[in-house]
Image (spheres, rainbow, N blue to C red):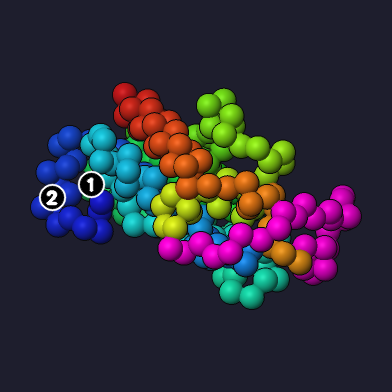
Amino acid sequence: MIIEQITTLDFSEGLKKTQTVIVPLGAIEEHGPHLPMNTDILHAYEIAKKAAEKLTVFVAPPINFGVCRSTADFPGTITIRSSTLVAIVLDVVEALYNPGIRNFILYSGHAGMNHVAAMLDAADQIMKRYDDAKFSVITDLELTDAEFFKLVETPADSHAGEIETSLILSLAPELVGELPEPDFPKFPKPLLVKDTRKYWKSGVWGDPKKASKEKGDKMVNILVKNLIGLVEEISR
């Protein structure tokens, strides 16, 4: 049940069948010269909707803005503060809890450390508030498995590379531009840098040229399958 597409009466009827919701999260950030800036939220929302086609679960409207650190210097990236994301998640969860939702899967297509930490912070806060609420905070990584990684040819593939390019080739191929050359930036760790673009000009971390729609279709199916398994687990 896609919440933004149903009526309030549909929602009330749906609560008789399930008290579980998937809340998709993501970010608007650069994804190289070939992928749209909504890549993270696009694939998380689509995978959540595909899961909802196969079992009864609510899917909330996506939270489009996230905490972006390494990509913040690229034009078009829209980042918010961690405290802002915590507040948004708290408000959304509380609004869904009040009518009867009890099981919350916070699924982010964006996996930045600060972003995920804010999601965990929000879940920790609201779990203390409601004893009968259950939470799962996940990114794509928690939905992958050995079958998924058999499809990946690029070691250390990370951002706008083989995996993300394959996902968007599967879900929205019309949004994919010419595939750029691979890039594996090297930052001066453990030092932090003020201008990430000094060390990372392409915005790609991986090899987009190894991506394909066929791979993307298989990856999507695996992510959907494992998300369904998580819904079934948290709903028990």
Mark 2 or 1, nearer chain start? 1
Q: Can residue 123 be seen in this view?
A: no
Residue 5 in the image: state x and y as whole percent: 21, 58
Q: Which residue is drawn at 75% across and 55% down?
A: 183
Residue bearing mark 2:
10
Q: Which mark is residue 1?
A: 1
Q: Which residue is drawn at 51% across and 58% down?
A: 39
Count of labels shown? 2
Magenta residues, dominant SS class? loop
Magenta includes 190? yes
Location of residue 174 by image quarter: bottom left
Residue 100 in the image: state x and y as whole percent: 24, 43
Residue 182 in the image: state x and y as whole percent: 72, 54
Three-letter amino acid code of the residue under disc 1: Met
Camera-side residue: 156 or 71?
156
Q: Residue 180 carries which label?
A: none
Q: Residue at x 23, y 46 (%)?
A: 1
Please give left or right for residue 62 compared with residue 4 in the image: right
Residue 171 in the image: state x and y as whole percent: 41, 52
**Quadrant showing the C terminus:** top left
Q: Label 1 crowding class (10 Å Cα cut-off): few <14, some 14-19, many 20+? A: some
SS class, disc 1: loop
Magenta includes 99? no
